[in-house]
Amino acid sequence: MTAPAHLNVAAAQYPIGQPETLAAWEAKIASWVEEGAATGAELLVFPEYGAIEQAAALGPKVYGDLTTTLERVAALTDERVAFHAALARKHGVHILVGSGPAEMADGRFVNAAQLVTPDGAVGVQEKLIMTPFEHSWGVTAGSPLNVFETALGKLAVLICYDSEFPLLARAAVEAGADAILVPSCTERVSGYHRVRTGAKARALENTIATVQSPTVGDAPWSPAVDFNVGAAGIYVPPEHGVSDTGVVAEGTLNAAQWVYARVDLAALRRLRTSGEMRNFGDWPAQPGAEPLKHTVATVKLG
């Protein structure tokens, strides 16, 4: 498969609301996908724990209890992914579905995001490193780290906190990832900036693009996603002729909006051997940088 020269991508600053029914939630998602596709994007990225919004439609006995929220939202996973797959097919786009709890065969819950393609293929990335809240909630670490081969290029997904760990991104890039998608959910400005800093650093270290999509807005009905702060961003290494700041596009803090950019993947590949700095190639010069211990699975989608 020929490596694409560009990636047209839109990242959602997605507002967590309180839909009264699942049909109302579906209507909201359908509207967002339509608006995202209208930007010209071929890839739409939704945030971490966007799926928790479905709990609102299931009533206070569900959304008011963390354990019940896990169980009931996880039970909707197949239906939720199928709905996004139908929208992907309708609009001819790839969609990273807002992540949510998924129940494993052994009864554990993981935080999983699904990448769906216009032809119906589905790839799953589970969050690898848990936050203190997730530990207390009973959400456990998943596996493996995947690189998805798609018509848009090779994509990896590092869910929120995962983006703050350099070796995860490096393993994905050494497995061929052109871009890393970073769905996030943070309740404070400090948390948003941690993930933003991680996304920008991973772009710099690896000479790739990173795409952050956050939840925004307050949802006091939910003990899981009650406060949400962030801005979407599309990042590359700061390099003359590509981006002086490393910011290709960035939204307004806490606004509900899509953030779109056309990323020159071919230029990023050239920078690895001809840029002002050669971070990608010089990575092995760090003491202890090799060998990487994280196993990466390659998943073909389409």
Image (cartoon, grey):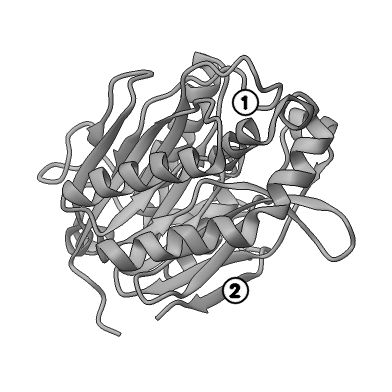
The amino acid sitting under disc 1 is Val
Q: CA distance from mark 2 to mark 1?
A: 31 Å
Residue at horizontal 32 percent and vertical 69 percent from the top = 153
From the image, state whether disc 2 or disc 1 is nearer to you: 1
User: Is residue 252 toward the left or the right of residue 77 in the image?
Assistant: left
Cβ atoms at labels 2 and 1 below 8 Å apart:
no
Question: Which image quarter holds the C terminus?
Answer: bottom left
Between 59 and 190, the residue placed more toward the observer is 59
Residue 120 in percent (x, y) is at: 43, 74
Between 248 and 67, the residue placed more toward the observer is 67
Name the mark on residue 225: 1
Q: Is residue 178 visible?
A: no
Q: Secondary structure at mark 2?
A: strand
**Position of 225 relative to 92 (above/below):** above
Question: Which image quarter holds the N terminus?
Answer: bottom left
Residue at horizontal 36 percent and vertical 60 percent from the top = 87
Q: Secondary structure at mark 1?
A: loop
Residue 188 in percent (x, y) is at: 55, 15
Total marks drawn? 2
Residue 168 in percent (x, y) is at: 58, 54
Mark 2 and mark 1 lie on one chain; the one further toward the N terminus is: 1
Label 1 Cα neighbours within 10 Å, binned few <14 / some 14-19 / many ≥20: many
